[in-house]
């Protein structure tokens, strides 16, 4: 019987991940992904498809020569994350993010926007 | 693939479900049966066995839970296990994340459960202690919800999702987790270590528990599938959806075995016990043990699928590849004559299948195999004939489809995409299709078949994915493929432009009045005076009022500063203008795409205004000099009321007006 019991247990030991591993995807950004804005914004805001964990979610903004222009003080609330930037002048800015959603999955990505007409 | 985490999760889930299943079995299945039958020796021995299973599972659950926490902390922080202990990352995870809070709560539940298990005496037939332990073990398993995807679904849908997921876990515990104790109990009865009456009563009780659990698994499984897979194309067109279908098939196989157990073997067991025959080999007991093991084997297969599901992104987030050459289209319902044909065909199906169903029922009741087979054959023939008869009519409701038919444009219908698309269209398409897409380009005149008018109504009958397919692969003998000249994103840009271009003509025709058709607005994001942002997809319950403003619009903008509570005004500057109380976006391409919708160049679009409803659809366009005059507050109030009274506009194509 012990052997039979083991056979019956086996399937349950193989029990996989019960839930779908979903991830936080970038839903919306301000300035918009790939957009061109006439004047430099004072902050960059990202909103995601899921709630974020503030302790493990971060973002940075660099200018066309690769220098950081964000203040480093990233604030996270619910599914949005924002950081103030000191963007000076026209050019392409790159936003890089890495977030942990509350269902414990890490996602990352980047996009750019342009300043100037 | 994140194999270590998958396996740790797998072991932890198995332990948690088995733990809950064993104690639930003790509390509501074998416990009450033993109390009524008073089998002192066999009962105590079996309770000892159940408690051993429970303690073992609890230990495995605790060890695997700790391993899960450590592994997760190393993965999300990208540090080594040693570093997460020394640098306090483990504490941050435990104290400052949803997962950590859930783990602390479950640790408390596990401690209480351990105390409850110590308190249970195997010799005692009382059930209250078992019931308390069962509640704690169930909570310990159901709390796993907060560590999974459901934890991240927002709003009321999230609450609903978590509730459904929790019930799914509880039902799975009761059924899957109870199969092993049941097999052990029945095997003990076969060896005459426990009385056959207890085995019979337990089987009957487990049968009821199983039916309840299966019902709950189906209902909650549908809810979860609906939230995660999202649509029919996602279900059959993505890996996630197809795995889900395999899981459903395996689950149905388990249900069939359970039905045999309940409808055939259980009544046989009852008869055998009533006849007071000592059960012999190959009897109902043996068959039930064997079936429980077979059922578990299907359980293995399901859980392997579930394991694969866990590392597959849900259908909602992946482009579904449509496997069929046709798809459903509701275009036929626009034509009264065709609609009548289709409706009568549906009646024929209903009327034709009814006798078949009756024949199947009659056949099932027939005693003799020959009659039964004959009835079923006639039913099948009738059904086939009926479907064959109406199939040509049913095809009226289908149109040609392609693998990309249900793709959702990754560009999000952004203004920059539309503007890019306009440039690409001018370079690659206008020579045949004409500058405005009317099919009147200079090169088109020499073609055997005239190029399609891309502003005509038929454009709205195609999905974005259909258009994308034609641009990518061309149309045989008619249009060349553009997958070489244009990259993937560029092809989507052209699709977005085609939509905006076709909408522009129709918006102009509405001349300042609210339409009940949803023309999707280009995506925008604006900053408001209080520092907040609004976007097409988040107007916070207001109606969006887009105003293209320049030097000459100062008066109008000042008038808008006297704020209307229903509106959120977004100024798109095309010249120097003070925006004061309004939200503002400096998106250069938004100004261009709105000018395109007006049918003008940016320089001539100043003063154009649009109303955007809560679903992100353009509902009205106005330009200075247009009637009715939007500068009149009463007129504006009427426009707002018109939008409020029909908040969800008609979807004009399958996917063009995709929610977001």
Image (spheres, grey):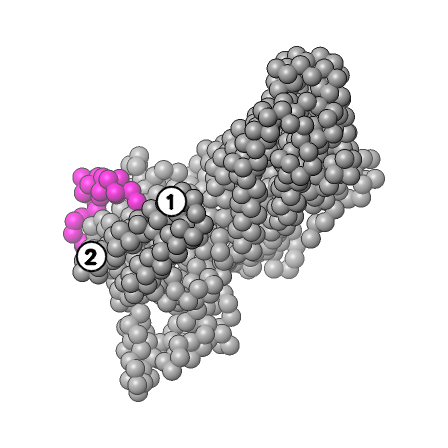
Residue B368 at x, y percent in the picture: 43, 47
Residue holding disc 2: B340
> Going 71% across and 23% down the picture, which residue do you hit?
B194
Query: Dot 1, crowdedness within 10 Å: few (<14), some or many (≥20)?
Result: some
At horizontal 42% and vertical 72% (from top left) the residue drawn is B471
Q: Secondary structure at mark 1?
A: helix
Residue stretch rendered in magenta on the structure: B620-648
Q: Is residue B196 left or right of residue B425?
A: right
Residue named by callout 1:
B361
Q: Residue furthest bottom?
A: B446
Relative to B122, say whether B614 is above or below: below
Is B636 part of what is drawn in magenta?
yes
Splitting the image into 4 quarters, where does residue B34 fall? top right
Q: Which mark is residue B240?
A: none
Quarter of the figure with residue B181: top right
Q: Residue A70: percent from the left, percent from the top?
A: 61, 47
């Amino acid at each position: 019987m012990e052997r039979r019991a083991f056979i019956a247990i086996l399937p349950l030991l193989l029990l996989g991940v019960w839930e779908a591993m979903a991830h936080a995807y970038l839903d919306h950004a301000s300035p918009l992904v790939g957009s061109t804005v006439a004047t430099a914004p004072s902050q960059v805001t990202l909103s995601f498809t899921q709630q974020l964990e503030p302790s493990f979610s971060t973002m940075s903004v660099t200018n066309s020569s690769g220098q950081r222009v964000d203040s480093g003080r990233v604030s996270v609330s619910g599914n949005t994350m924002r950081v103030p930037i000191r963007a000076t002048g026209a050019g392409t800015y790159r936003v890089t993010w890495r977030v942990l959603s509350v269902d414990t999955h890490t996602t990352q990505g980047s996009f750019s926007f342009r300043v100037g007409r | 693939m994140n194999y270590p985490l998958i396996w740790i999760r797998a072991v932890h889930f198995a332990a948690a479900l088995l733990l809950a299943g064993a104690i639930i079995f003790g509390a509501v299945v074998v416990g009450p049966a033993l109390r009524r039958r008073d089998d002192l020796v066999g009962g105590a021995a079996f309770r000892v066995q159940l408690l051993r299973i429970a303690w073992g599972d609890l230990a495995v659950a605790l060890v695997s839970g700790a391993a899960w926490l450590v592994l997760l902390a190393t993965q999300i922080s990208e540090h080594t296990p040693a570093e997460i202990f020394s640098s306090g990352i483990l504490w941050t995870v435990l104290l400052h994340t949803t997962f950590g809070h859930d783990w602390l709560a479950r640790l408390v539940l596990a401690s209480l459960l351990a105390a409850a298990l110590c308190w249970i005496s195997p010799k005692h037939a009382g059930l209250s202690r078992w019931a308390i332990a069962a509640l704690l073990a169930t909570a310990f398993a159901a709390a796993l919800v907060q560590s999974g995807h459901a934890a991240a679904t927002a709003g009321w849908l999230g609450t609903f999702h978590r509730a459904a997921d929790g019930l799914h876990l509880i039902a799975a515990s009761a059924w899957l987790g109870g199969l092993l104790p049941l097999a052990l109990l029945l095997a003990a009865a076969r060896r005459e270590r426990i009385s056959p009456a207890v085995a019979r009563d337990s089987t009957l009780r487990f049968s009821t528990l199983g039916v309840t659990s299966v019902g709950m698994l189906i209902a909650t499984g549908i809810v979860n599938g609906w939230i995660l897979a999202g649509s029919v194309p996602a279900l059959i067109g993505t890996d996630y959806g197809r795995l889900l279908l395999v899981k459903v098939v395996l689950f149905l196989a388990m249900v069939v075995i359970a039905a045999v157990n309940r409808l055939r073997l259980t009544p046989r067991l009852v008869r055998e016990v009533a006849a007071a025959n000592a059960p012999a080999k190959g009897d109902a007991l043996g068959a039930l043990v064997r079936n429980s093991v077979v059922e578990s084997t299907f359980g293995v297969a399901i859980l392997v699928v579930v394991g694969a599901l866990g590392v597959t992104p849900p259908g909602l987030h992946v482009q579904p590849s449509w496997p069929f050459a046709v798809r459903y289209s509701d275009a036929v319902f626009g034509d009264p004559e065709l609609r009548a044909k289709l409706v009568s065909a549906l009646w024929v199906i209903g009327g034709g299948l009814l006798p078949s169903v009756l024949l199947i029922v009659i056949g099932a009741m027939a005693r003799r195999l020959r009659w039964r087979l004959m009835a079923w054959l006639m039913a099948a023939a009738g059904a086939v004939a009926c479907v064959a008869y109406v199939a040509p009519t049913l095809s009226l409701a289908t149109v040609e489809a392609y693998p990309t038919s249900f793709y959702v444009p990754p560009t999000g219908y952004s203004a920059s995409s539309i503007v890019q698309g306009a440039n690409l269209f001018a370079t690659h398409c206008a020579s045949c299709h004409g500058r405005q897409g009317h099919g009147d380009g200079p090169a088109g005149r020499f073609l055997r078949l005239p190029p399609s008018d891309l502003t005509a109504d038929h454009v709205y009958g195609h999905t974005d994915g259909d258009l994308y397919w034609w641009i990518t692969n061309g149309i045989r003998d008619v249009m060349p493929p553009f997958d070489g000249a244009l990259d993937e994103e560029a092809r989507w840009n052209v699709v977005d432009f085609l939509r905006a271009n076709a909408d522009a003509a129709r918006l102009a025709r509405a001349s300042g009045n609210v339409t009940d058709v949803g023309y999707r607005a280009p995506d925008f994001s604006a900053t408001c005076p209080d520092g907040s942002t609004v976007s097409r997809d988040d107007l916070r319950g207001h109606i969006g009022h887009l105003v293209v403003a320049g030097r000459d619009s100062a008066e109008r903008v000042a008038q808008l500063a006297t704020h209307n509570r229903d509106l959120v005004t977004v100024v798109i500057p095309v010249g120097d203008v003070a925006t004061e109380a309004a939200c503002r976006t400096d998106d250069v391409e938004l100004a261009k795409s709105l000018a395109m919708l007006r049918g003008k160049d940016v320089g001539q679009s100043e003063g154009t205004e649009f109303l955007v409803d809560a679903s992100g659809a353009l509902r009205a366009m106005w330009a200075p000099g247009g009637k009715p005059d939007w500068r009149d507050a009463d007129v504006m109030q009427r426009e707002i009321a018109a939008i409020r009274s029909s908040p969800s506009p008609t979807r004009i194509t399958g996917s063009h007006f995709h929610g977001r």
